[in-house]
Amino acid sequence: MQERVYALFGVFGPLLVYISIALSLFLSPWFSWESNMLSDIGHAVTSDAAPIFNLGLLLAGFFMMLYALTAFKKHAKYSSYCLLVSTFFVQLLAVFNEAYGELHYAVAVPHFLILSLTSIAYTVEKRSAVALVTFSVVMFSWLLYTLNIFNIGIAVPETVSKLVVAWIMYSAISIFRQGT
């Protein structure tokens, strides 16, 4: 029973990321997909939506950390260690928001890299097609952005990168169902 409760953190954490980003975007009519980063919404000085955005990241990171340390660790030991580090960086992103300049980027880059590593680890450890597909879509979006194939800003691949957590939710739902 307790494992099922912890599995819910693996669902609620990613949902909280999606909800806080969506709500923050709604409250930020100035935001442009061509010229802004998602982090612009979390800028503590210039964005009215920053408290929602940053609190969402902080709580989501905490929920996913609980999931990584409990139910997910029993399900995918090595992937859980990667997820634990990644979720710590999510929380650091909320604390060291874009108002902190270079420090924010020093936290953001490792977060995205470790989240990708987590997807690879889970793909290998559990032979997960879902993790492989979401990872591939994310990498393809970064490739399109890097090659400047479309007139998109960095917010687009950042947002697509949030798809990676779809496999985390999928794993959490699977763990939850196994506990019935």
Image (cartoon, rainbow, N blue to C red):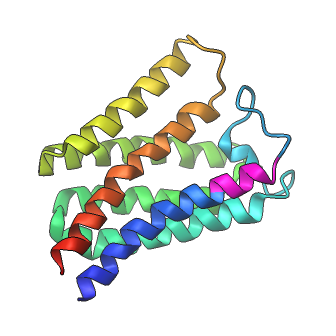
Residue 167: % across, % down: 32, 51
Residue lying furthest bottom: 1
Residue 122: in magenta span: no
Residue in front for this viewpoint, 53 or 115: 53
Q: Residue at the location (55% across, 71% down)?
A: 59
- Quarter the C terminus occupies: bottom left
Q: Quadrant of residue 173?
A: bottom left
Residue 105 visible to an observer of this rendering: yes
The part of the chain drawn in magenta is: 21-28
Residue 100: % across, % down: 73, 51
Up the image or down, 146 lies above or below 93; here it is above
Q: Residue at the location (70% across, 31% down)?
A: 33
Residue 166: % across, % down: 38, 51
Main SS of residues in magenta: helix
Residue 42 visible to an observer of this rendering: no
Q: Residue at the location (38% across, 59% down)?
A: 85
Residue 73: % across, % down: 22, 69
Q: Residue at the location (23% across, 56% down)?
A: 79
Q: Quadrant of residue 67?
A: bottom left
Residue in front for this viewpoint, 44 or 19: 19
- Quarter the N terminus occupies: bottom left
